[in-house]
Image (cartoon, helix red, strand yellow):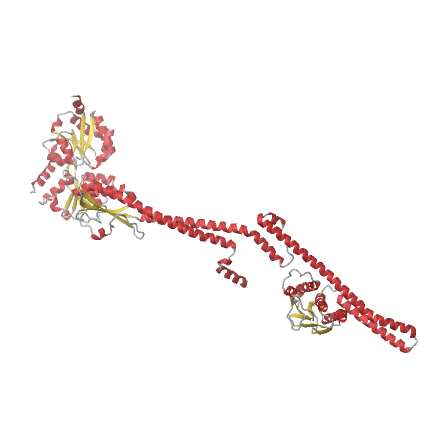
Amino acid sequence: MTGMTGRMFTAATKPLSWPITVKVPMLVVLLMVIVSAVITNRVLARLADTQERHLEQLAAAYLDGLSTSLTPSVLREDIWEVFDTLDRSRERYRGLNVDWAVVTDGNNRVLAATDPTRFPSDRTLAPGIVAQFPGAGVELVEQLTTAYAARPLTYQDREIGHIYAAADIRPLLQERSEVFATLALTNAILTLILAVIGYCAVRRMVQPIRILTLHLDRSTQGPIEPIAEEVVGSHGGEFRRLFTRYNGLARAVNEREELAAKLAEEEKLASLGRLASGLAHEINNPLGGMFNALDSLRRHGDRETVRTTSGRLLEQGLAGIRDLVRSTLAVYRDDSGRRRLIPSDIDDLRLLIEPEIKRKRLTLHWTNDLSGALELPAARMRDAVLNVLLNACEASPEDTAISLRAVADAQAATFEIADSGSGLPPHLKEYLEQPDTAVAPFGRRSGLGLWMVKRLCQELGGSIHVPEKGDGGTLIRLVIPFESRELKHVA
Amino acid sequence: MAKAEASEKTISFGLTPVFLTNDLELLTKLKSYLERATGRTVQLVQRRTYEEITALLVSGQLQAAWICGYPFVQYRDRLSLVAVPVWNGKPLYRSYLIIPRDREMTGVEELKGDLHAFSDPNSNSGYLVTAALLARQKLRPEQFFRQTFFTYGHRNVVRAVASGLAQSGSVDGYVWEVMSEIEPELTGRTKVLRKSELLGFPPIACANTEWERDSVPLLKRALLDMRHDPEGLQILDLLRLDGFSSEDARLFDTIAEEMTLVMSLPA
């Protein structure tokens, strides 16, 4: 669990390792953010432009209209008419949102203003106010809330006064921020919708890959499971072809597994045959002596010494046969794998490979350090070790040596079988050491025995090691852990 | 000759810029009523100043006109009274000195140095009353006030004071009172500092020469009967007047005295 969180954490910091169902929506979001940023920027710039132009036109119209109607009144210095004109123009130029307007005479003295309390008539207009007005045009500054526009009043080429007007531009700025908010909100919603669509679409697209991955994952724990026909049928195009090919592959692999099992069975029968011929040979040897003794008895049975010698020989021969039969019985007794392994089970194997040892004149080094009953199933353990021993006999050239060493500690029993052969081919070594069941290596008869060993080992939860052996030949180490007591208790 | 006959049948009636003259509903109703009551075609004539209307009246271009008491006493020898409006049961009104609502004052003398709004140089309530008040102190308006200006309309005086353009104004008391019913938000920004004594209400007058012709008696009858006619009552309601009455020219003697006082000041 900790490992998984750690992996996820590492994955979260590396966008390239994100699943495609996240990557594509994230890409959509990124693109949308860029697009909306560009669009918003453009729209706002255009809006500001339009607003500024509009304001400028409106201000020009306002000042033009005013200057025409104000000129006669300014000439007469008619305070009331100037005020009345300014006051009425407020209604007429409502769109301009005039905050205040002042009309001065040629001496910069206020004639009248829209707000007489702020700009009393017959007083000089403060220079600070005049300084706020730009030379020409209207400025629309984001930080300011007021736009200033001024126009001289001329009559017969003589400057008779000025109009100063200040417009409240907060509504324009307000409009800008509203447009910005609308754009941002719309883009955010669009982005979200597109991201969700992207997620759903990609999820749907990669679903066949997930199915395939799931089946491949399962195949590591057992036989390869083909994808159900209705699932294959529900997909079209390249995925249907992919699934069909996967199913073909699954069928082929499963057939090979079956074939391997069948060949292993045959191999078992073949070793049985070898064992049987070995047994016959073992029985045949004392039989010859026994027949000789019988013949001597029949011919010279009246002699006391002959009777004694023949009886001893017969007894020896029969004892040899009895031992052989007993150990064979012990080895092949059907105990359904319930009996626990005892040290003599391993020692009995020595008798079983004896014929092979003798045939090839091999030297056998036998070290059995096991003691007491071990928490291991006797029959399957013996099968596994016997197969390795037989393989070792087969691999060893004549007049060489093989060895067995069996030891146990608190957790597991270890069996090391060494031979003096030409060594294990690398692909077999790899096959044995791999933890999961892979396809059995074919093409060599020797592989089948190993395949069985591997199967048994795996059933017992053990592992196989093939360490490097300095003096040539092969060393195979089986490490089989004891069955857990709880498990045994439950069973 | 036929043309003269036709013009003979038309009554030209002059209206000074009292505040309600720009009310189209009133003008339409007044024209319609007068035409029905006199049986003549009535032409309502409006001008910007009292002076223009007075000139038209004196020169005989108008059969009658609603003028102010001041022009009436100015041309007393050439004009005759037709009728006087009755307001609050009397043919009288006052002139008001108004100031912005938030201006704290106790007396008229504090208005010294103001920018002052008058209605019309030929208006009694909108000029003469204040000028006479100052004349008693031997002062002319331009000496007492820093500056004065004329708005040519009583309503404009209220606007000028309400907006702060003028620090004080002289206005027709009748107009201010009626406006405080119709436009309380405008008059509410002003307050009355001083009310004058009762004076003759702006009358309807005609040139002496017109008195002999039949159109003036017809017009007088129509005005006096207005309070008994449903359409006439609607007009009176719009004007907030009780009716019109026939009065003696001596009603305007107080105005004549004020005029004499103002005229007596050395220029």
Question: Seen from this angle, which residue lies furthest right?
Answer: A302
Q: Judge left or right: residue A296 versus residue A484.
A: right
Q: In the image, residue A270 lies at what x, y percent?
A: 75, 63
Q: Say which quadrant the N terminus of chain B sits in.
A: top left
Q: Is residue A175 visible?
A: no
Q: Quadrant of the C terminus of chain B?
A: top left
Q: In front: A419, or A90?
A: A419
Q: Specify the quadrant of the image occupied by residue B132.
A: top left
- Whether residue A411 is situated above or below residue B43 in the rendered picture: below
Give residue A354's quadrant in the image.
bottom right
Relative to A403, B242 lies left or right: left
Image vertical order of residue A255 relative to residue A478, above or below: above
Q: Is residue A358 above or below residue A237?
A: below
Q: Position of residue A101 (x, y in %)?
A: 24, 46
Query: Is A66 or B99 nearer to us in this picture?
Result: A66
Q: Nearer the viewer, residue A98 or A13?
A: A13
Left or right: A138 as drawn, with respect to A245 = left
